Image: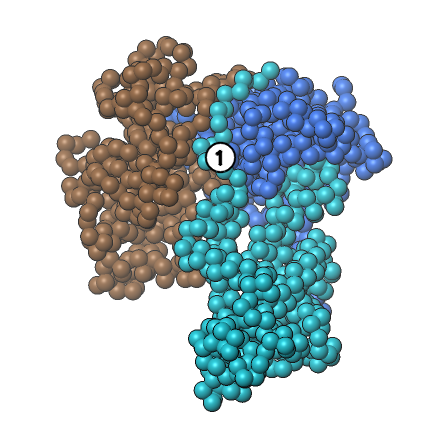
Chain colours: A blue, B cyan, C brown
């Protein structure tokens, strides 16, 4: 099997809220106050092949955004490895590291907050290419115009400011900014969630076109299963910091394995399903500050056993190209 | 090749620069516009005082004690009208106000600008480095701000001595903390925004991120704090001069003029203190009104 | 639906906003009705005027906006022009509203029981505190909140997002209203929590016969929940009819375009239909049909404002060129 383009192994990220001076004094005096640790990402292993689109799905607190930011280089992992094109990120020399950083780019969710409101569009898109030598400062306008056309924006408007554009156009500016440094891997963090339905369709089509034209690889993070089903080759389902199921898209939607995946698919409303009798799953999503022991999902799982309360299920290959983390699979 | 460009014009917002929009938003409040006009007039007077002032009240050759204690509207022996009267030494009050504005405004603005530069840098450093640096700086800021400004100023003057430069130093030391706190607050908010994350993702250097991306977005609240603080500095300087520990007599600010007139106030020569006081009042009120409107106008934009 | 007076009958409602930049015709001639126990989905993207319609019905439009013409007949009584006193007696009592952000309903500094008792006694001062508390407890149970006694004594910040929304719904239910207006109540919630809310809402309407207007941009949610759907664009309803009819055989080009742009099972891997261009600003609606700039079927006739017609029985449309031939390609 060919080497994957991106491989993350046992990646973990903990957010620790340290005690300040007052807290530490209180602790010494016997108070039960403790450091708060959020296990945002808890030992995640994923492989992504070149040219593929992997959809990463989960609800709030599952850690998908944190995972995306670690891959894009915005957050540093607490432990675990990220291997890009066969080389671990921490073992790269500064030059390789910079090249890897530029090749992995991120598209953000909020079209308002992800653009610097005080910079003109030409500078937003052109700053990094000029800074890194992709084009000369004197050629910035030509370079930026070309990128803008590629994402469907009229280069005429490059001297305008972000607030003069609509949400969908701003998202395109964000995509242009990423494309301007010639990336090979794009992490899309809920990139279309904030857009209207008709604009979402435009941007989804754009992503698919770019994948073909530029041979890009995607990690598509979303909570919207319909979009993920439409665009992905493989799907990874996360719950409370852990991966619970990985499968090819068709397999996953046709025959989900993990109980959480079942619940998720059941509850996603679809346009072609009318007058539904809802049978929602019980319970709230637990707080990542205090996740349930053993399998995180056991309090809400209709099939929970004693074992599930104590032992964390391993992510195992239950069929070719299908992985699931559930003790129920052990019976077979 | 992706879909042909069919986006059309960007969102149907008028094609105006941020500056044009700012001006039209500002002009919404008529009172603020009036205040702004008054402020411009005051600045004009302050800058051009030597040329537009009817007399030079500090030219000892021209000033005659025979002209002293004249009522507003009276004329001197040379036929010059003293619109606001004269003080006991024969100096024209109106001209003295013109020169006084110059000093007051000059000292206030100068100290404001220096305090802004120093305070902002410290605030940015605190926000950017966080941790112990931040805690240390902010504790100093808190302590400083918990003392009344006038008390700090008095202590500093007594330590530093008299003189224009000492007064400016004292005013700077009193004011920098406000700027530091404001900038730190903005910087902390902006630092977590996605466009800063994007800049990190694009492997742009730290210096570039702080100065090109972070700082410009922290400026709007600074403008507001700057105007209000300038008014504060002016009134503080006036207080110090009134108390006699501010600027020396050779550079009479409005505060000193008011103090001078105090001696003769009760004998009926109200105009010597009264009109400089009015001038001070108008200056501070117009700066505050302009600052208020600036705050209202700049705020909604920050929310976008 | 029985032949008696509908719970709500909106007739040619117009709500305009008089701003410095011009007049925004947010609601521009909207007519629909809601029968007893019926759920009507009011669907549209941002800028379509759907939320303002909801606010207009319940009388919560703030200056610079106001209702300029039309009637809102609630059980036969016109709410437009009703005195604020009388309107206040109805609001929270016979008509209730649920917002996207539950913190718009919940006061963060008051306990839940205080707020609920307050709501009950505001409309019926004769009821004793004990009875009011009992009713509050029942309402919480009705929306599926476990351990209601404990929850009653809590503050809103102690609840999760989904719980808060359920409390907001419980408050809406307290006085057994005839009509509930829900403005995007599940948009900000996770899929599994959304499923729970939809379940409660559905149960509610079935058991108590309460009518509901569900305002959303999400066609899939409406598909499972509503009996009737009204599609809004540019401040007007462009198509309305029974849910199955509209979703399976859409007639207005906008509805067809919208349905074509929703990704999902059937569209896997293909380009989505994208409606070209962007929604017009409500400040700057074109002469005639609001959709003409983006409509594949637009022609000279569309420069006139289309009246409401009934090209198919039970379906009201504003269009000069409705798609009556269902085999026609979308976008043809």
Q: Is residue A60 in sight in this rendering?
A: yes
Circle 1 crowding by C-alpha within 10 Å: few under 14, some 14–19, many from 20: few
Seen in the image, is C142 located left or right of residue A91? left
Q: Position of residue B38 (x, y in %)?
A: 48, 60
Instruction: Pinpoint the chain carrying mark 1.
Output: B
Identify the residue at image location x=21%, y=35%. Answer: C11
Lateral position of residue C299 relative to residue C195, left or right: left
Asked if residue B33 is positioned above or below residue B96 in the image, the reply reads: above
Question: Does residue B230 show up?
Answer: no
Q: Which residue is mark 1?
A: B15
A185 and A34: which is toward the camera: A185
x%, y% of residue B104? 60, 69
Q: On the rendered image, what quadrant is the N terminus of chain A found in?
A: top right
> In this view of the protein, which residue sits in the foreground, A112 or C286?
C286
Q: In terms of depth relative to the viewer, which is nearer, A44 or B135? A: B135
Q: Is A20 on the left-hand or right-hand side of C38?
A: right
Assign a secondary structure to mark 1.
Answer: loop
- Identity of the residue drawn at 35% across and 16% down: C298
């Amino acid at each position: 099997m060919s080497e994957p383009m991106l491989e993350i192994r046992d990646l973990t990220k903990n957010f620790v809220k340290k005690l300040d001076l007052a807290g530490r004094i209180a602790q010494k005096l016997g108070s039960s106050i403790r450091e708060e640790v959020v296990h945002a990402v808890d030992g995640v292993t994923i492989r992504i092949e070149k040219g593929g689109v992997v959809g990463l799905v989960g609800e709030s607190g599952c850690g998908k955004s944190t995972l995306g930011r670690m891959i894009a280089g915005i957050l540093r992992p607490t432990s675990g490895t990220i291997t890009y094109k066969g080389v671990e990120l921490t073992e790269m020399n500064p030059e390789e590291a910079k090249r890897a950083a530029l090749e992995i780019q991120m598209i953000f969710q909020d079209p308002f907050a992800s653009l610097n409101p005080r910079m003109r569009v030409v500078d937003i898109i052109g700053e990094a290419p000029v800074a890194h030598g992709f084009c000369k400062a004197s050629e910035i306008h030509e370079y930026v115009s070309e990128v803008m056309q590629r994402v469907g924006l009229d280069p005429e408007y490059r001297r305008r400011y972000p607030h003069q554009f609509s949400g969908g156009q701003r998202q395109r500016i964000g995509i242009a900014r990423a494309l301007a440094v010639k990336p090979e891997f794009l992490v899309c963090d809920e990139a279309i969630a904030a857009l209207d339905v008709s604009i979402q369709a435009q941007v989804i089509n754009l992503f698919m076109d770019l994948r073909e034209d530029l041979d890009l690889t995607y990690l598509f993070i979303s909570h919207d299963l319909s979009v993920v089903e439409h665009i992905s080759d493989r799907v990874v389902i996360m719950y409370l910091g852990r991966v619970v199921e990985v499968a090819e898209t068709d397999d996953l939607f046709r025959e989900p394995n993990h109980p959480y995946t079942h619940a998720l698919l059941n509850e996603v409303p679809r346009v072609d399903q009318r007058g539904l009798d809802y049978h929602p799953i019980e319970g709230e999503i637990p707080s990542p500050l205090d996740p349930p022991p053993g399998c995180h999902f056991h309090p809400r799982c209709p099939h929970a056993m004693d074992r599930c309360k104590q032992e964390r299920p391993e992510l195992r290959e239950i069929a070719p190209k299908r992985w699931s983390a559930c003790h129920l699979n052990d019976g077979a | 090749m992706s879909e042909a460009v069919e986006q059309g014009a960007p969102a149907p917002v008028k094609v105006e620069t941020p500056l044009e929009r700012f001006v039209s938003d500002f002009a919404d409040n008529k009172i603020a516009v009036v205040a702004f006009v008054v402020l411009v007039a005051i600045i004009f007077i302050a800058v051009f005082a030597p040329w537009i002032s009817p007399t030079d009240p500090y030219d000892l050759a021209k000033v005659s004690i025979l002209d002293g204690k004249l009522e507003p509207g009276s004329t001197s022996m040379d036929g010059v009208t003293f619109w606001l009267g004269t003080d006991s030494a024969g100096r024209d009050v109106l001209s003295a106000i013109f020169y006084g504005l110059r000093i007051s405004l000059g000292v206030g603005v100068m100290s404001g600008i220096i305090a802004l530069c120093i305070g902002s840098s410290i605030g940015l450093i605190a926000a950017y480095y966080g941790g112990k640096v931040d805690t240390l700086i902010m504790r100093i800021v808190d302590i400083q701000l918990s003392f009344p400004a006038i008390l700090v100023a008095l202590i500093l003057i007594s330590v530093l001595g008299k003189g224009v430069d000492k007064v400016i130093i004292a005013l700077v030391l009193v004011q920098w903390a406000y700027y530091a706190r404001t900038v730190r607050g903005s910087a902390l908010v902006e630092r977590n925004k996605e466009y800063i994350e994007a800049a990190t993702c694009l492997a742009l250097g730290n210096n570039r991120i702080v100065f090109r991306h972070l700082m410009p977005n922290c400026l709007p609240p600074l403008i507001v704090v700057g105007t209000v603080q300038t008014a504060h500095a002016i009134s503080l300087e006036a207080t110090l001069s009134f108390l006699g520990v501010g600027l020396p007599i050779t550079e009479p600010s409005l505060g000193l003029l008011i103090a001078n007139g105090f001696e003769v106030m009760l004998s009926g020569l109200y105009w010597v203190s009264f009109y400089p006081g009015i001038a001070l009042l108008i200056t501070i009120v117009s700066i505050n009104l302009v600052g208020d409107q600036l705050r209202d106008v700049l705020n909604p934009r920050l929310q976008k | 639906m029985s032949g008696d007076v509908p719970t709500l009958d909106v007739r040619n409602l117009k709500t305009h906003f008089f701003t410095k930049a011009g007049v925004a015709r947010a609601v521009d001639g909207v007519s629909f009705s809601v029968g007893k126990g019926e759920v009507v989905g009011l669907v549209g993207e941002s800028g379509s005027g759907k939320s303002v319609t909801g606010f207009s019905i319940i009388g919560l439009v703030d200056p610079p906006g106001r209702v300029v013409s039309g009637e809102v007949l609630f059980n036969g009584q016109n709410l437009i022009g009703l005195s604020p006193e009388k309107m206040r007696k109805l609001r929270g009592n016979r008509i209730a509203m649920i917002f996207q952000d539950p913190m718009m309903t919940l006061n963060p500094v008051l306990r839940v029981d205080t707020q609920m008792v307050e709501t009950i006694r505001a409309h019926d001062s004769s009821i004793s505190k004990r009875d009011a508390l009992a009713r509050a407890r029942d309402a919480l149970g009705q929306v599926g909140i476990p351990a209601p006694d404990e929850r009653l004594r809590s503050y809103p910040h102690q609840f999760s997002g989904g719980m808060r929304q359920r409390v907001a719904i419980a408050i809406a239910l307290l006085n057994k209203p005839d009509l509930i207006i829900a403005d995007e109540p599940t948009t900000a919630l996770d899929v599994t929590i959304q499923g729970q809310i939809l379940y409660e809402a559905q149960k509610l309407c079935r058991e108590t016969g309460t009518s509901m207007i569900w305002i959303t941009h999400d066609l899939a949610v409406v598909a499972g929940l509503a009996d009737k759907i009204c599609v809004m664009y540019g401040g007007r309803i462009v198509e309305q009819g029974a849910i199955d009819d509209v979703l399976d055989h859409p007639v207005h080009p906008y509805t067809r375009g919208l349905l074509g742009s929703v990704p999902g099972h059937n569209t896997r891997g293909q380009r989505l239909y994208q409606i070209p261009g962007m929604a017009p600003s409500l400040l700057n609606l074109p002469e005639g049909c609001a959709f003409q700039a983006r409509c594949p079927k637009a022609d000279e006739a569309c420069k006139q404002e289309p009246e409401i017609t009934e090209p198919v029985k039970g379906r009201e449309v504003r269009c000069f060129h409705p798609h009556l031939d269902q085999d026609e390609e979308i976008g043809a």
